[in-house]
Image (tube, rainbow, N blue to C red):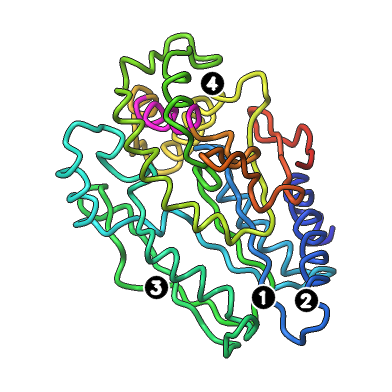
Amino acid sequence: MTTTSLHPPAVHAMANHVSNCLEAHRARFSTRSKYPPLFVGVQGPQGSGKTFLTSRLRSLLAEPPYSLSVAVLSIDDLYLPHAGLRVLVETHPRNRLLHGRGQPGTHDVEIGNEILKALKVINGAEGGRGPGQVELPVFDKSLFDGEGDRAPQSQVVRGPVDVVVLEGWCVGFYPVRREVVEARWHQPVPGLDDFDIQAFVSLEDVLEVNDLLTAYVEWWRAFDAFIQIRGPTTSPFAIVYRWRLQQERDMKAKNGGRGMTDAQVKTFVDRYIPGYVFFGDGVMRGTVDEEGGRLPPWYGQGLVVELDLERNLLSTHQF
C-alpha cells in the first residue's frame, strides 16, 4: 500500500482541487521566473475535522506526484494576546459573543495582514526579495486557565512555498447589511428548533460582530482558491453539535476523562451558531454593500466537501 493511498478520500479531493487551482494560478504568471504561492482558504465548523484534513492535505501535497511545499496557518493562532482579549471583554461588557476567543473581533487583524503580505512575496515574486522566511505566531490555549495567550515561540516558514493555507471556522465569512441581520434575527434557525437566537444574543451584539468582521475582508482578498468542509445540507447546524460532542468524548476517552461535559459542549457550540446564521453564506456569495454585490475572489475556484456524521466523504462540488 502506498503512502498516498492512506489518506482519506476527502483529502484526495482537496489535493486534486488545489493542484488544479495551482496550475491555473501559475499560468497567470507564465512570463515570470518566480511565482507567488497559491493562497487557499479552508472553512469548516467545529468538530468537522478541518484541522486534521488540512494537516493530511499538507502531507499528501508534499508527496509525489505533487511534491509541493505547503504552509498552513490556523486562524486560531491569530488570536489577540490574552491582554487584548481581556480589553475586548472590558470594552464590550454586555456582548457575550466577545467574551472569550473565537468570534470575529478576537483576532489580531494587523498581524494577520502583515503575515499574509509577507507570505505573498516569500518566493521573491511581486517585489519580494525571497526566498525568505516568515514567522507565524502560535496561540497556546492552555495558558491562563484555558483562556489562552500567544506563545513566546513562533513557527518559521521558509521559502520557496507553493501553497499557503489559512484554515478556520469563520474563514471567508463576510459582513452583511443591517437589514439582513435584522431579517435573520427574526427567523428560526434551520434544524435547531430549541435554539432561540433572540434569547441567546441581542441584535446589537450581532451588529457589533458584523462591524468587526469588516476588517477581515482584507485577509479574504488574499485568497486565490477555497475549500469549504460541511455536513449534509439537510442538517447544516445540528451536525455541528454532534461532531463536536463526538470529538470531545473521543478526547476524554484517551486522556482519562479530562474535558467538557456534554452540557458544556452544547454551550460551547451555541456561541458559534450566530456566526453561521448571519455570516456563513459569505463563503459563496461574498458581500452586498452600498455599491452592490461582490462575489468572493475565489469564486470559480471553490470546492465544497460534504461529510457524513462519521466524516466520511459524501460528495464534492465546485462553486
User: What SS does tag 3 mark?
Assistant: loop
Which residue bears the numbered disc 2? 29
Q: Position of residue 274 (x, y in %)?
A: 42, 28
Query: Where is mark 4, residue-wise?
Result: 238
Give the residue type at disc 2.
Phe
Q: Which mark is residue 267?
A: none
Badge 1, how many Cα within 10 Å: few under 14, some, many 20+?
Answer: many
- The mark that comes first in sequence, 1 or 2, is 2
- The answer to whether marks 4 and 3 mark residues whose Cβ atoms lie closer than 8 Å is no
Q: CA distance from mark 2 to mark 4?
A: 43 Å
Question: Mark 2 falls on what kind of element?
Answer: loop
Residue under the point 44% across and 35% down = 248
Mark 3–mark 1 Cα distance, whole angstroms, equals 23 Å
Q: Which residues are magenta?
A: 267-278
Of the two numbered discs 4 and 3 on the same chain, state the one appearing first in sequence.
3
Question: Which residue is tagged 3?
Answer: 154
Name the residue type under label 4. Answer: Ala
Q: Which part of the image, by quadrant, shows the C terminus? A: top right
Query: Which numbered disc covers residue 36?
Result: 1
